[in-house]
Amino acid sequence: MFKNIEHYKPDLEKTMCMLGKLYADAARRRGGNVTFRALPPSDVEFYSTFDLTKYNYESDINEYAEDLSRLLAESFELRREVDDNMVPTISPVLGIGDYSAFVAGEIDFRKDTSWSKPVFENIDDWKRIPPLGTSKWYRWFLEICEAMLEISSGSGIPFMRGFFSPLDLAGALRGDMIYYDFYDEPEKLHDLLAFCADATIMFAEDIYALARKYLKDTKYGMYYLDGKINMSEDIACMISGKTYREFARPHTQRVINHFGEGHMHTHSRSLYLVKEICSMDGVVNLWLPTDPNAPRPIDHLEELIEDADGVCLAIDIDDFSEIENNLEILKKGNFSLTLPVKDIEEAKALTERFNLLEGI
Amino acid sequence: MIIEEISLALQKGKANDVKALVQQALAEGYTPKDILEKGLIQGMNVIGGKFKRNEVFVPEVLVAARAMNAGQEILRPVLVKSGIKPIGKAVICTVQGDLHDIGKNLVKMMLEGQAIACVDLGVDVPAEKVIAAIKEHEPDLLCLSALLTTTMIMQKEIIEAVNKAGLRNRVKIMVGGAPVTEKFALEIKADGYAPDAASAAELAVQLIGEMHV
């Protein structure tokens, strides 16, 4: 179903070299890298056509994997002439619920996403669940990964999977009670967060081992997994920098330390947390999408460059002129700039325009 | 002064202290109206202002609101006895398709902090359930929350359903949630939009005032 990655990304070597330099400089806290991603509708539209309620995940895993792989392959094919920083990746899509159901609980599937309900009524309920790795969704998720890896084997397309941070995982398992836990049960909350860090490490290692089985002989198949962890810090948007530092950071740091490099995600709602997240050891990338009714990162470049201290900030922009108008400032830090475009032709044209900018 | 202590304890989220201080204030002869307005509501107003300015965050608002509830529990029977009623009533929910309730809960707590009684319909609430609740509870306000761009459209559908049911002139409708903007609120013909929970409480008081003119 999938062709070789170089079919979808003819300039693969150049792109990987650019990304390699970007993250190496970010690790050394040295700026000077500005990269560009055009976001045509075809990169994301397939999510809305992929009906998650259609499958019985116990019996239809192969059908699910084939349907999703076909949509991904079509999407990659459409953008093959776009010479930007986007590298095709294979990743299961199950919504949000699977990000915590691998520990415990059920997934509530909707057509285009999913949710999980909090299952830890008491803060130390993690001590009473069956051993990690034995839950239904832990097993099914690995089976889904394997089905997708089998379909894509031979293509050399990197496999990719992100995770909740320990705080996000604890938030999903505990629900809104977690906001009271900061005050009512600080010690027990640390215990829960430590459990969530252990769970994330174990689950990620199992997924990575599975991917390695299929991708170990490919040049870039493990690019987004080996020595890396990709984690969200969404609940962090609801708490202060001080609370983040005290509760979330030590556990997130432990997960990053286990793998090596941290590729993080939070929201523009919490620009005040950029410094906290980027100052953790090993963090090289922070995806910071703009929220409605919240500050736009592109409007706060000077302070963000200072707070990020060389960590690559993946931010979105509304218009290409925002790159041209801010180019000299952008070059002081490391950036991956994403611009939604109306179609592939515009994606190609703007990428060419970007590649002609001086000093890029 | 004990009323000030109530406000400060509430701001720190000390529910047991608030409870004890309210009891003490009543014993010392303070009026329930003063305890409510100058102690509890004043404390929530301070927290609301700090929340708007990013000086406190969700956990601090939640523990403060819990302390407010603890104080109100003591005060409620005395308020009823004194004939002091809530300033209005709101029906509140997260719209159909959306399971997020933290924003809705924060608004509810802030409204209660302004002595507005709330009927909470929960999350994932369809238009029919909202219509039934308006008929049953006869609220001054209907508050609709949505966290997702994919579900905010349900706010429009619910407003249209309220229109269709002939109830639109009986209730003011407020909308909110992370993706919702003032422009969207105007487009869907809501009566009001607020960017955060504290502003929502201020708007609610204003809209209830307009209802009762």
Image: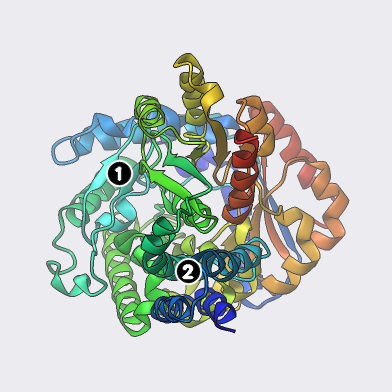
Apparent side of residue A270 relative to residue B27 in the rendered image (left or right):
right
Q: Is residue A261 above or below residue B195?
A: below
Asked if residue A151 shows in the view, the reply is: yes
Q: CA separation, marks 1 and 2?
A: 40 Å
Is B162 above or below relative to A186? above
Residue, disc 1: A148
Query: Would you say A206 lies left or right of A7 here?
Result: left
Work out whether residue B200 or residue A241 is closer to the camera in this orientation and state it. Answer: B200
In the image, A177 versus A158, the foreground residue is: A177
Q: Is A35 displayed left or right of A88 in the figure?
A: right
Quarter of the figure with residue A48: top left
Neighbours of disc 1 within 10 Å: few (<14), some (14-19), many (20+): many
Quarter of the picture containing the C terminus of chain A is: bottom right
Amino acid type indicated by mark 2: Pro
SS for dot 2: helix
Residue at disc 1, secondary structure = helix
Locate residue B181, reporting x and y percent: 65, 39
For discs 1 and 2, the disc positioned in front in the rendered view? 2
Q: Which residue is mark 2?
A: B59
Would residue A331 be visible to someone looking at this image? Answer: no
Q: Residue at x 28, y 75 (%)?
A: A195
Q: Where does the N terminus of chain A fall, quadrant-wise?
A: top left
In the rendered image, residue A97, in percent from the top left (x then y), is placed at: 32, 49
